Amino acid sequence: MPLELVNVGFGNTVAVQRVIAVIKAGSSPMKRLVDSAERQNRLVDATNGRRTRSIVVTDSNHVVLSHLQPETLSQKLAGSAIEDEQPAEATD
């Protein structure tokens, strides 16, 4: 199975199969999650200095910050899943 990647902004990508959750940033619990990940060296900042709008949590407990809206990332992930389900077209 080939590795599928989703763009989380500015050319940064995350493996689709590893994503557990896409969460809206800004609440106190999410700030604590980010602080904890930073202390444990599990934080990846893919915002390029922009405001953090969403947080991606992976199965390895890494936390990825993105400037994209959570809805946008969810649509990208859903689009990737839909492509997986469609059978490949036969070529002649």
Image (tube, grey):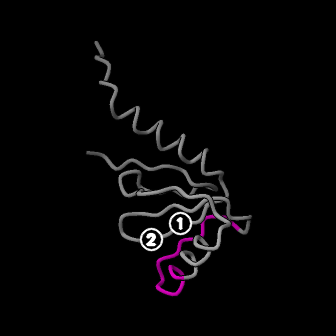
> Could you tell me residue 55's position as x and y percent?
57, 62
Looking at this view, name the residue that lies furthest to the bottom.
39
Residue underneath mark 1: 64
Label 2: few (<14), some or many (≥20) within 10 Å? some
At numbered mark 1, what does the secondary structure look like: helix, strand or loop?
Answer: strand
With respect to residue 92, does 74 lie above or below? Answer: below
The amino acid type, in three-letter code, at marker 1 is Val
Looking at this view, name the residue that lies furthest to the right.
50
At numbered mark 2, what does the secondary structure look like: helix, strand or loop?
Answer: loop
Q: Is residue 83 magenta?
A: no
In this view, the residue in front, 35 or 2, is 35
State if disc 2 and disc 1 touch (CB < 8 Å): yes
Left or right: residue 78 versus residue 89 is right
With respect to residue 73, does 39 lie above or below? Answer: below
Magenta range is: 36-48
Tally of numbered discs: 2
The quadrant of the image that shows the C terminus is top left
At 40% from the left and 71% from the top, the residue drawn is: 61
Residue 89 sits in quarter:
top left
At 52% from the left and 42% from the top, the residue drawn is: 76
Check residue 13 in the rendering and tell me which mark sits there, or answer none: none
At 43% from the left and 39% from the top, the residue drawn is: 80
> Could you tell me residue 11's position as x and y percent?
59, 55
Left or right: residue 39 versus residue 4 is right
Q: Is residue 44 magenta?
A: yes
> Could you tell me residue 1's position as x and y percent?
25, 45
With respect to residue 46, does 10 lie above or below? Answer: above
The amino acid type, in three-letter code, at marker 2 is His
Check residue 62 in the rendering and tell me which mark sits there, or answer none: 2
Label 1: few (<14), some or many (≥20) within 10 Å? many
Q: CA distance from mark 1 to mark 2?
A: 7 Å
At 57% from the left and 75% from the top, the residue drawn is: 34
